[in-house]
Amino acid sequence: MKQIDEFVNSMYSDVKGKDAKELKQEMRSHLLEAVSELKAEGKSEKEAIDIAISRFGDEKQITKGLFTLFKAQNYVIRNLFRTSMAALVLGLIVLIGLIWTENYNQNKLHKIDQIVNSVFEKLADGTFSEEKKKEILSLVKATKEIEYFVIYKNPEPGKGVPKQEIMKNWDVAVESGYSSIKGSTEYVWKDIKDPYENYYMVAGYHQISTLNNFYSIPIGLFIAFAVLGLTSFFLKINTNRKMLNAFIK
């Protein structure tokens, strides 16, 4: 209806942007509903349009008050939405960081296992030489994850002793890293004993802390994103209608 369109456009002729467009659409919708109700009561279309428009009172006063209220409420909605997006982005950053750290730790452990197993394979034939010692040291030193490494050689091959006696009675065949950290509780100690009682190998590396408890952080941020995002969404849908209803009697 041209008269309604002209009235709505005149009310917001000085207002630009998406917010004004949405408000115009809501106002036009309310006016058309009012016109339909009046026509159902027996009014002509022109009478119905005039009455519906007159119910808005002075257009300048309505425009000023309504748009001020609209902007104030929309400001809150925008802040809610921005906060929800910030929570989403921060949650994703924290989650990606946790996953990356866990993968790094798993790769570190896998690499340590590979080196230890490779060294053990070199000793599987029961022989030991300077050339083999150099190869083992080269393997270990190439792995920064292993901070201390030692191979004890049984002076009496085939004759076993209790585990706690090995470091006292067996000879050190290969050693790499700082011996001062031996036995430190800050390190994890991985040891392998040759079933033939020829060698005993120990590798030490920094203890890797678990990250399971930290996953509550991104979960909380994602929940905040969902709650704030849905709140801003529903407020956005209902804002125009609620404000216009306050003026349409």
Image (cartoon, rainbow, N blue to C red):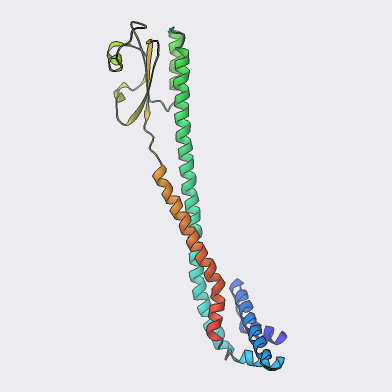
**Is 25 left, or right, of 221 in this rendering?**
right
Nearer to us in this view, 20 or 154: 154
Q: Position of residue 170 (x, y in %)?
A: 31, 11
x, y percentage for residue 135? Answer: 47, 14
Residue toward you, 217 or 37: 37
Decide: is 234 above or below 44. Answer: above
Q: Quadrant of residue 199?
A: top left
Would you place residue 41 above or below residue 240 in this image? below
Q: In the picture shown, does residue 222 fall above or below 144?
A: below
x 50%, y 66%: residue: 231
Report whether residue 59 is seen.
Answer: yes
Specify the quadrant that holds the C terminus: bottom right
Q: Position of residue 119 (x, y in %)?
A: 45, 17
Residue at the farthest front position? 41
Q: Is residue 29 left or right of residue 92?
A: right
- Rendering coords of residue 160 (x, y %): 33, 10
Residue drawn at 48 percent across, 47 percent down: 95
Relative to 113, is 84 above or below? below
Q: Can you name the residue that lies furthest to the top here?
A: 156
- Quick one: 176 or 210, which is closer to the camera? 210
Count of numbered tags: 0
Q: Would residue 46 be found to the left or right of residue 132 on screen?
A: right
Identify the residue at image location x=72%, y=85%: 2
> Which one is in front, 134 or 191?
191
Could you tell me which quadrant the N terminus lies in?
A: bottom right
Q: Is residue 175 visible?
A: no
Quarter location, residue 52: bottom right
